[in-house]
Image (cartoon, coloured by chain):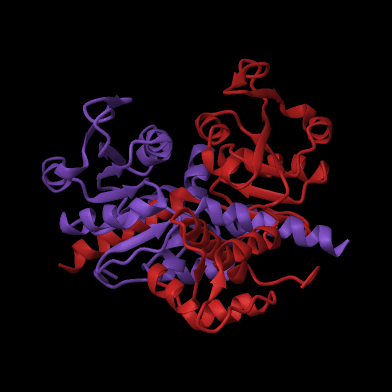
Chain colours: A red, B purple
Amino acid sequence: MKGEKISELTTNRLSVYLRCLNELDAQGEASVSSDAMARRFHMNSAQIRKDLANFGEFGTRGVGYNVKTLRDHLTSILGLDREHRVGIIGAGRLGAALADYYGFRKANFTVAAIFDSDPAKIGNNLGEVAVLDAKDFSQAARSYMIDVAVIAVPAEAAQSALDLVEKAGIKAVLNFAPVSLRASSDIKINSIDLTTSLESLSYFLASSEDAR
Amino acid sequence: MKGEKISELTTNRLSVYLRCLNELDAQGEASVSSDAMARRFHMNSAQIRKDLANFGEFGTRGVGYNVKTLRDHLTSILGLDREHRVGIIGAGRLGAALADYYGFRKANFTVAAIFDSDPAKIGNNLGEVAVLDAKDFSQAARSYMIDVAVIAVPAEAAQSALDLVEKAGIKAVLNFAPVSLRASSDIKINSIDLTTSLESLSYFLASSEDAR
């Protein structure tokens, strides 16, 4: 499968399998069948077998998959055995919370630097990470070997932040600004939109009240 | 449209339109055509007209939509003119960051209380919000009039947190735990999964490297 792209939905499922395997390993389980994994984590066992067969992983009949071997294999497929270096753009509340976000470290993502254009913030530290001037982004991205950018600026500043990222040649972006962004097709942008999630809950509650 | 459910994709687009209208209003624009809105915010003008026609909103030919009127209408459709009261389960890093999250207030969501089962945390305050004992969730949910629960606990504790929420009769949930949850069908769960987003970026970078 080297170099061959699999779908986003499949990689998302691989992420979930990996978490299950980490949990099973922590509990001292040496092997697991697709059926047991499906039951335990509310998934579909045929789907599990199909997804893993893509990668040449075939469980042993009556025994299942070896937990550690499969975990290491998925870790490598997802690229989680290599360190990624993150530059966060925006040193506001969200940027500060993310600088300290445990999930980054757990996924082998190291926050290397934070960028802002506010002179009052530049030169400070957030935790152990320095706040740098956003206008030096390209140069700093090279010297800090940043390969993932996190956009944590207000909606109206997000497109210019992405333009900086694109100029610096960074190809992977996690976007928290609630706005749709334009980028060239070789950049992957994953967006996390809390506002839309909240507003859809609000709509759900409002329409349920109206229905009563 | 009262009581009649529209799709999640449509409400998500209404959220985006609302943000655009807020931006236009802040810039002093009194009216906007679907074409101008589409150009400016990279959307499809026919889609905008279709979505808004669902709600009896028809722009005036040559003038467009009245920005303030349409904004107020969308605010009401999305239920954002009513206050929602949030209970956060989990007083760890993420819970603490969310207790202080500006986006809640902006969407008319008030964080009423935070719950945890750690005796060292119970009784403290996070910002202005008290940390209560998770075992009193049902009673506190009633007295604090909580109608939205936020699950900010580790994956292995998420299902029990959701069980508490369900017992308390709360119907809207924002879940940050990276795990699939079982609930009865009248509960709406929106999940925000940062880990999966990160791992999909990691896979993208790994597979691009392999392809080179």
* Residue drawn where x is 76% and y is 51% of the image: A171
Q: Residue at x 70, y 59 (%)?
A: A76
Pinpoint residue A98: horizontal percent, then vertical percent. 55, 36
Horizontal side of residue B204 vs A120, given as left or right: right
On screen, residue B144 versus residue A162, left or right, reads left
Work out whether residue B78 can be spotted: no
Residue B45 at x, y percent in the picture: 58, 66
Q: Which of A110 and A56 lies nearest the eye of the viewer?
A: A56
Q: Does residue A54 appear in the picture of this structure?
A: yes
Q: Residue B70 at x, y = what percent? A: 41, 54
Position above or below: B61 against A146: below
Quadrant placement of the C terminus of chain A: bottom left
Q: How many marks?
A: 0
Residue at point 69%, 42% (across, down)? A149
Towards the viewer: B176 or A53? A53
Q: Nearer the viewer, residue B38 or A85?
A: A85
Which quadrant of the view contains residue B140? top left
Q: Residue at x 67, y 49 (%)?
A: A173
Q: Position of residue A147 (x, y in %)?
A: 75, 44
Quadrant of res A3: bottom right
Q: Nearer the viewer, residue B195 or A151?
A: B195
